[in-house]
Image (cartoon, helix red, strand yellow):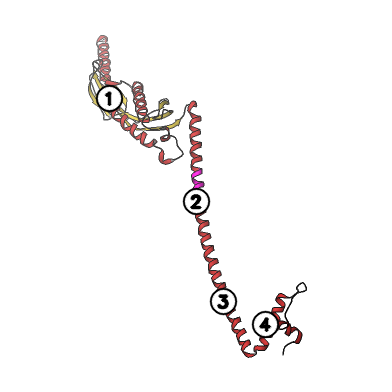
Amino acid sequence: MGMKWVSLIIGIGIALLILNSALFQVAETELAIITQFGRPVRVLRDAGLGVKMPMPIQSIRRFDRRLLVFDPKPGEFLTSDKKNVLVDAYLNWRIDDPLKFLESVKDRSVAELFLADLTYAAIGAEIGNYPLSALVSTVPESLHVDRIRASVTEKCREGAKSEYGIDILDIRIKRLNLPDQNKESVFDRMRAERERMAKKYRSEGEEEAMKIRAETDKETRALLAEAYKESQRILGNADAEAARIYASAYSKNPEFYKMVRTLESYRKFMDDRTTVILSTDSELLNLMVEGTP
């Protein structure tokens, strides 16, 4: 009786071990592949409880289906104008085809080695098509970092999906830096660019100032001409009025008017330093000697 119970217990234990190795659960964050003697036979994408043949006939390989972040070391690349630049980038990826992933790279660590090579190759090829000013510049219009990033992402996505079963969602550039031997030349170029822009702004300012001065001079001349015209009109009217008054006075008493005009002539050309020689029949002399008739 005791041996039967022992055999029964051993049988139940073996059955439980076989059942335990046959039952498995796939979590929401996992992808799974059932392998039979090391050869993949079934891919499991849905979470839940599953059944397989017990080990060692069949086994299960699990992979993380979540979005993963890979941050490789910065790489040094050459631009089209033969300048070295350090690019520090990272990429977001996940497993798209677990069967191809298992056949090509086996696990995450190996996959990230291949992704680093793929990313460096795409970045190097793309940066080689642009000058350094497309990456580092004080002029926003000349920067093409977003275009380079988008092109690198697209190329890496196609290669990773077809070769490794990996879907690359995005590649981002964290930092662009320059090797020490290139920094001084870049800074010199940036200073020269700023000086060029300053000269341009000064030239535009001087041109605008000249326009303002020319317009002001034009308005000034116009105002002076109008003022001169008005002054001449006023002087003309005054001369006409004076002539009219003189004529009216002359018509009323010609002899008196003639005497006044003669006296005014005396005042204009005679002073204490003037010597006048007049003939005896001069009207001026008669007026001084004899007075008015």
Type of amino acid under label 2: Glu
Type of amino acid under label 4: Arg
Badge 2 marks a residue whose secondary structure is helix
Mark 4 is surrounded, within 10 Å at the Cα level, by few (under 14), some (14 to 19) or many (20 or more) other residues, namely: few
- Magenta stretch encompasses residue 23: no
- Quick check: 85 left or right of 274? left
- Quick check: 251 left or right of 149? right
Q: Is residue 230 above or below residue 15?
A: below
- Magenta stretch encompasses residue 199: yes
Q: Mark 3 or mark 1, which is nearer the start of the sequence? A: 1
- Quick check: 279 left or right of 15? right
Question: Circle 3 sits on which residue?
Answer: 236
Question: Circle 1 sits on which residue?
Answer: 163
The residues bearing labels 3 and 4 have C-alpha atoms spaced at a distance of 22 Å
Q: Which residues are magenta?
A: 198-209
The residues bearing labels 1 and 3 have C-alpha atoms spaced at a distance of 102 Å
Residue 132 location, quadrant:
top left
In the drawing, what numbered circle is on residue 207? 2
Question: Circle 4 sits on which residue?
Answer: 261
